[in-house]
């Protein structure tokens, strides 16, 4: 006996005419007219329950043909099952022996399926242009017309649009065409404006400075906050900016509350430190590192700490650095190139006066200076006399030299070439035991014109 695997249908008991035996068929399957929907698979049927058979074997065969215009199985091939939509008639034939044949006939319909339309690009964000809904079907075919809330014009504004469409399937045998069929809702969401800071970075200037906020669209900005505070800052630093914003076009853009606009940067002011070059003798304490600054600090700010230098105590030059000098978060410091010069340790003092000079304004040896070392610390006086004992020059400063002219002479002429006597009194460091001593020295110098 042959059997096909099928759908579940209502059980219908059919009575048949017996030609050579009293055979009854209990059929579990379609009614006299049954309707199904095309799904691309064959519609098979279960075997009937047969009674009244004589002893011995029997055979059950199905013959299915198309009716009412449906073309199927014209050569009546046994057990051929239809797939496509259409109307069909089924013959079930039971045979036993040469003369025991009976048959039962019923009709059924495979209806065309309806294509399903859907929207592929929803939701989508407003972009100021008209936006077309992308409508697709679960089967191939042609989309002839799309409607947005009944209009054939694709929308621009944000909103929710009911989409209907006309559709003609490629497979018109098994699928219905659609007219004004719903594809669902097409949603154009409001766009979100973006905020940004347009005047960053700024430089600390001692006053309150506010961030300038711009938006990608027109509207009103309010409630600007700096790291969560509504107070605009003065000090240098990085401030996270948030703001509220109401767009002019509220139809297509969202309002913003506490939205980020980025960072607002106030950079420190640059201060140049100009250090003085200084000198010391090895093993002596470092002298103070004096400096000036430019520009001046603002708002009564002041420096803390002090300049430093590169390490070392052997004779040589050591660059002076910023050390611990600081002016706070609102300033960034830089320093010029200056050195601490460490001179070799000398125990003897030097105090000498050249024995000749030529004040002829040729740029060479025009001024008579005292030659000394660091162990000479103070000058009480340096006096020069002419041959007659008249004082012609006096100084109490090592930096002052004699130019060969007489003090108080309004003519300003250089004195005559001659031998002149000098006398000096000065303070010098003792060679041992520390402390200082007063020394007096005298000598002569030849003035040559």
Image: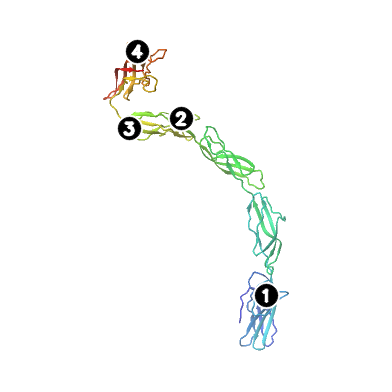
SS at mark 4 in the image: strand
Q: CA distance from mark 1 to mark 3?
A: 117 Å
The numbered mark at residue 293 is 2
Q: CA distance from mark 2 to mark 4?
A: 45 Å
The numbered mark at residue 391 is 4
The reply to whether the C-beta atoms of the residues labelled 1 and 2 are less than 8 Å apart is no
Q: Residues within 10 Å of mark 4 (few under 14, many from 20)?
A: some
Q: CA distance from mark 4 to mark 1?
A: 150 Å
| Marks 3 and 2, the one that precedes in the sequence | 2
- Of marks 1 and 3, the one in the foreground: 3
Q: Answer left or right for 432 relative to 326.
A: left
Q: Position of residue 105 (x, y in %)?
A: 69, 79
The numbered mark at residue 30 is 1
| Marks 3 and 4, the one that precedes in the sequence | 3
The numbered mark at residue 326 is none
Q: Position of residue 54 (x, y in %)?
A: 63, 87
């Amino acid at each position: 006996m042959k059997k096909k695997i099928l759908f579940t249908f209502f059980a219908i008991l059919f009575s048949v005419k017996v030609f050579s035996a009293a055979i009854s068929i209990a059929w579990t399957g379609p009614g006299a007219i049954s309707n199904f929907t095309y799904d691309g698979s064959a519609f098979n049927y279960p075997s009937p329950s047969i009674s009244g058979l004589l002893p011995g074997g029997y055979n059950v065969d199905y013959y299915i043909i198309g009716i009412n215009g449906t073309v199927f199985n014209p050569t009546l091939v046994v057990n051929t099952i239809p797939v496509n939509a259409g109307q069909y008639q089924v013959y079930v034939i039971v045979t036993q022996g040469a003369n025991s044949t009976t048959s039962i006939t019923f009709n059924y319909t495979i209806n065309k399926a309806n294509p399903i339309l859907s929207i592929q690009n929803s939701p989508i964000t407003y972009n100021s242009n008209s936006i077309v809904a992308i409508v697709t079907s679960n089967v191939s075919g042609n989309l002839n017309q799309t409607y947005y809330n009944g209009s054939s014009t694709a929308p621009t504004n944000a909103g929710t649009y009911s989409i209907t469409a006309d559709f003609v399937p490629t497979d018109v045998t098994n699928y219905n065409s659609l007219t004004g069929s719903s594809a669902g809702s097409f949603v154009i969401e409001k766009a979100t404006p973006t905020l940004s800071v347009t005047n960053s970075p700024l430089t600390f200037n001692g006053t309150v400075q506010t961030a300038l906020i711009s938006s990608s669209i027109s509207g009103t900005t309010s409630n600007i906050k700096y790291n969560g505070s509504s107070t605009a800052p003065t000090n240098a630093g990085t401030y996270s900016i948030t703001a509220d914003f109401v767009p002019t076009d509220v139809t297509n853009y969202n309002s913003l509350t506490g939205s980020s606009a980025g960072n607002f940067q106030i950079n420190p002011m640059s201060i140049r430190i100009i250090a003085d070059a200084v000198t010391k003798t090895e093993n002596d304490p470092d002298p103070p590192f004096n400096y000036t600054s430019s520009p001046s600090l603002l708002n009564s700010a002041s420096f803390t700490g002090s300049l430093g230098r590169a390490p070392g105590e052997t004779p040589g030059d050591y660059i002076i650095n910023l050390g611990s000098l600081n002016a706070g978060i609102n300033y960034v410091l830089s320093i010029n190139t200056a050195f601490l010069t460490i001179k070799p340790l000398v125990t003897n003092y030097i105090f000498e006066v050249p024995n000749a000079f030529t004040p002829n304004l040729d740029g060479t040896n025009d001024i008579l200076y005292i030659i000394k070392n660091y162990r000479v610390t103070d000058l009480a006086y340096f006096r020069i006399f002419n041959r007659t004992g008249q004082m012609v020059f006096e100084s109490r400063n090592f930096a002052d030299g004699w130019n060969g002219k007489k003090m108080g002479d309004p003519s300003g002429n250089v004195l005559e070439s001659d031998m002149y006597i000098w006398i000096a009194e000065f303070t010098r460091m003792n060679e041992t035991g520390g402390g200082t001593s007063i020394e007096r020295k005298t000598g002569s110098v030849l003035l040559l014109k």
